[in-house]
Amino acid sequence: MLKKLTISIVMAALALIGLTAAPANAQDRHVEVINETQHAIVQFFASNVDRGTWEEDILGEDVLPVGQSVNINIDDGSGACLYDFKAVFEDGEELVRTGIDVCTTTTYTYTEG
């Protein structure tokens, strides 16, 4: 009887571990990118830190005007949380930020300085 109870407890614990591990992979990776600079963002890239190259321009033909924001799904299907961001501004300036945790970051603001 004690052996059955122990097995049941172990099975329940394993099931609970499986349930708590699942949300880590299914975390929300939506980030609101806010442009509080003096120049429009004309290109925006977000790439998993394990990649050696930038993914495609998320904005495509769109731009992110000064004072505006856009909600972006930064999920590449890999389950990764750490991403590098690259913003290209209308004046040609590029800003790269590395190691942003998109599983815990809900907003990311570009500012002057």
Image (cartoon, grey):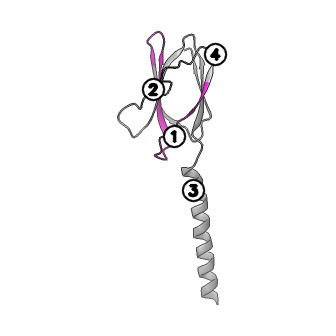
Q: Secondary structure at mark 3?
A: helix
Residue 22's disc number: 3
Residue 53 picture quarter: top left
Alpha-carbon distance for marks 1 and 2? Answer: 14 Å
Give percent across and percent down for residue 64: 56, 18
Q: Secondary structure at mark 1?
A: loop
Which residue is tagged 4?
67
* Left or right of 61 in this view: 53: left
Q: Residue furthest bottom?
A: 1
Quarter of the picture containing the C terminus is top right
First in sequence, mark 1 or 3: give its number. 3
Residue type marked 4: Gly
For discs 3 and 2, the disc positioned in front in the rendered view: 2
* Left or right of 84 in this view: 72: right
Residue type marked 1: Asp
Residue 57's disc number: 2
Q: Which residues are magenta?
A: 70-94
As rendered, which of 56 and 51 lies closer to the eye? 56
In the rendered image, residue 86 lying in the magenta stretch gets the answer yes
First in sequence, mark 4 or 1: give its number. 4
The residue at 64%/15% (across/down) is 67
Give percent across and percent down for residue 54: 39, 30
First in sequence, mark 4 or 3: give its number. 3
Which residue is tagged 1?
75
Q: Secondary structure at mark 4?
A: loop
The residue at 56%/57% (across/down) is 21
